[in-house]
Image: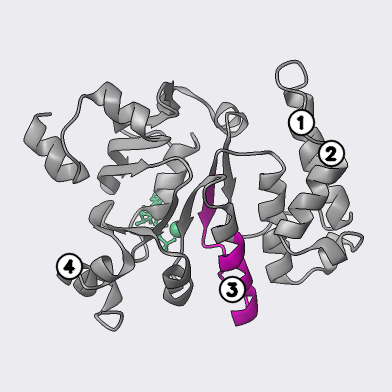
Amino acid sequence: MDRNQIESRLALPWEPKAVRRRKYILLLEGLTVSFDGFKALNNLDLALMEGELRCVIGPNGAGKTTMMDVITGHTRPDTGEAWYMDSINLLEKDEVFINLAGIGRKFQKPSVFESITVYENLLLALKARKSVFSTLTAKLSMPDRDFIEETLALIHLQSLKSKQAGALSHGQKQWLEIGLLLVQQPKILLLDEPVAGLTAGEIDRTAELLLSLEGRHSLIVVEHDMTFVRSVARKVTVLHQGAVLAEGDMETVSCHPEVIEAYLGGAEC
Ligand SMILES: Nc1ncnc2c1ncn2[C@@H]1O[C@H](COP(=O)(O)OP(=O)(O)OP(=O)(O)O)[C@@H](O)[C@H]1O
Ligand SMILES: [Mg+2]
């Protein structure tokens, strides 16, 4: 690939590949995924800075979930590259490795253990992580109990910690699931439609929660709810037909003629 192609694709000044990899916690380049000849991803690029909160939007079938499938090792692309923390080639790693290496993913449907309490759910997730790392990085920087309490406060479930998880509202279960990821101390959090089915109040609290994670974690948030996206948007990537259609702040992407045509319809501009 020549210099002009790279510049036009990444919308960044040209630089040697090694420099580019060092700059981003996650770098996807030229990913293509085909299902029976249909390209779910078509030469997709995405570069995520450490601590960044990135929103990814786009119409149904644009390839948003498929992109997460590739990052997490669930789907192998036909072509392209995916680098994590400079030197980890995600395309050579399996799902378990990628998760343990610090990429946590939340699916749309919450999957918490319903029959145990909120606190026990968090404790279990923490212990699971520690048991895997017992010989490597077993020591947490603070006692487990404090760490769980801190996480409970972040996810607004402190007062419900003794409640059975099955009795939580849909929104509270979503927050608990984010908490289960957080106690595993991920570097990158991938959240696929985190506010689907939530009430307006719950959506606001989720926005607050995600903003509080910015800087400590790198986040990719896929969402269709534009009110929510506007409330957390920093840099926004618009996917369409498996590729990046536009990237920039909310105002820039919502007024982009092709984004208006493909997805937003102009009302946001
Ligand atoms: N395992 C699969 N087999 C065949 N086609 C698939 C598979 N997974 C995804 N696709 C197709 O790839 C395209 C992209 O799907 P994907 O789920 O990534 O879209 P999305 O942007 O997440 O959409 P939505 O907003 O509806 O969740 C769709 O046309 C989908 O039908
Ligand atoms: Mg999807």
For marks 4 and 3 on the same chain, the one whose residue lies earlier in the sequence: 3
Element assignment for label 2:
helix
Classify mark 1: residues with Cα within 10 Å, few (<14), some (14-19) or many (20+).
few
- Sequence-wise, the earlier of marks 2 and 3 is 2
Q: Within 8 Å: ligand 2 and the Cβ of disc 2?
A: no
- According to the picture, the residue beneath numbered tag 3 turns out to be 203
Q: Is residue 161 toward the left or the right of residue 128 in the image?
A: right
The answer to whether the residue labelled 1 contacts the one labelled 2, judged by CB atoms less than 8 Å apart, is yes
Indicate the quadrant where residue 211 lies. Answer: bottom right
Query: Which image quadrant for residue 116?
Result: bottom right
- Residue at 63% in and 60% down: 109
Res 258 label: 4
Give the residue pinned by disc 1.
140
Please state the horizontal and vertical placement of residue 178, each as a whole percent of the image. Answer: 66, 54
What x and y, as percent, mark residue 150? 77, 51
Q: Nearer the viewer, mark 4 or mark 2?
A: 2
Work out how far the residue at label 4 is from the one at label 2, CA to CA, in angstroms: 49 Å
**Vertical side of 196 occupied by 89: above or below:** above
Query: Splitting the image into 4 quarters, where does residue 33 fall?
Result: top left
Residue at the image point whose x is 86% and y is 65% from the top: 160
Confirm whether residue 9 shows in the render. Answer: yes
Give me the residue at 28% from left, 42% from top.
Answer: 45
Region of the chain picked out in magenta, as a range: 189-209
Disc number lying in front (1 or 4):
1
Q: Residue 65, labelled with which disc? A: none
- Name the N-terminal-most of marks 3 and 1: 1
Amino acid type at mark 4: Glu
